[in-house]
Amino acid sequence: MDNDKVRRISVLKVPVDIVQPEDLEEVVKALYSDGKNHQIVLLSMADLMRARRSGEFRTMINGASLVLPISLSIIKAARFTKRPLPVRYEPFDLIIRLLNILEQWHKSVYLFGASPKSLVKAEKNIKATFRGLSVVGRHSSHIPKGFMPKIIEAIRKSTPTLLLVGKGVPGSEKWIPRNLKNFASGLYIWCSDVLDVFAERRARPPAMLFERGTEWLYYLPHHPLRIFRFFTLFRMKFLSLWYRLRRR
């Protein structure tokens, strides 16, 4: 992105953007005002390690207009390898800020993902909270066979400023770059649980856990396989050490 408020660095050869919180509104306004499509990626530790490999996910990260870190381990890796220090964002807080910015300028959002029940409740709560923001459409992740082209057409015709994509959409965050060619302009962001949080069907991790970088513990009872994140963390620390030694 060509903006003096955004600084793109490389952390373990993966692009990460530095955006100061006080500059976020200016950056968002510049993105939705230039008539182009812009994917915003919320980058976790696991995402960063996936993006180191070749393939569609790496291409998506490299092509995103904003890559904002959400994992403390990414900040630590940047510091350890003597890179400029990025700003870490909590996913739901970031999306709240994004919706607040769009509301101030009377922009619009389309909601895509989650279950039909969650989506209806999420829309209701978003409308009640962000009264100046237009919800121009919605569709759950329950998609009849062959119905995706109609959803894409509905999104295209509604021309939302922001397409907010949640859990259950085929391809998850990769659905966005796969379909950008169908849309004229706007912002596109994927966050797995965001619509369920808006629907009050899922809580957010406590702020204390997020600050310590242990928010994954909150999800562990329902997702026990996340315990294997230690292997990913070990690989990341080993790579960080290797990159630091190379810089000497």
Image (tube, rainbow, N blue to C red):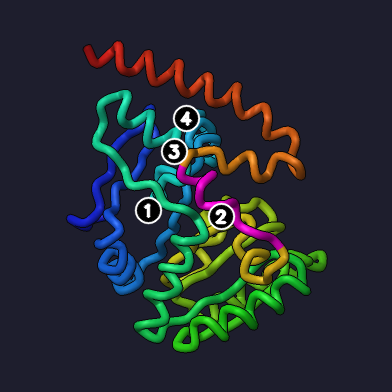
Q: Which residue is mark 1?
A: 66
Residue type at tag 1: Leu
What mark, if any, has residue 178 been given in the picture?
2
Residue at (39% x, 34% y) in the render: 14
Determine crowd level at label 3: few under 14, some 14-19, many 20+ residues with C-alpha closer than 10 A: some
User: What kind of element bears circle 1?
Assistant: strand
User: What kind of element bears circle 4?
Assistant: loop
- Residue 19: x and y in percent read 29, 53
Residue at (48% x, 35% y) in the render: 48
Alpha carbons under labels 4 and 2: distance apart: 20 Å
- Residue 50: x and y in percent read 54, 33
The answer to whether residue 209 is magenta is yes
Determine crowd level at label 4: few under 14, some 14-19, many 20+ residues with C-alpha closer than 10 A: some
Q: State the count of labels.
A: 4
What mark, if any, has residue 72 been given in the picture?
3
Q: Which residues are magenta?
A: 202-211
Q: Which is more N-terminal, label 2 or label 3? A: 3
Q: Nearer the viewer, residue 111 or 54?
A: 111
Label pair 4/2, CB-CB below 8 angstroms? no
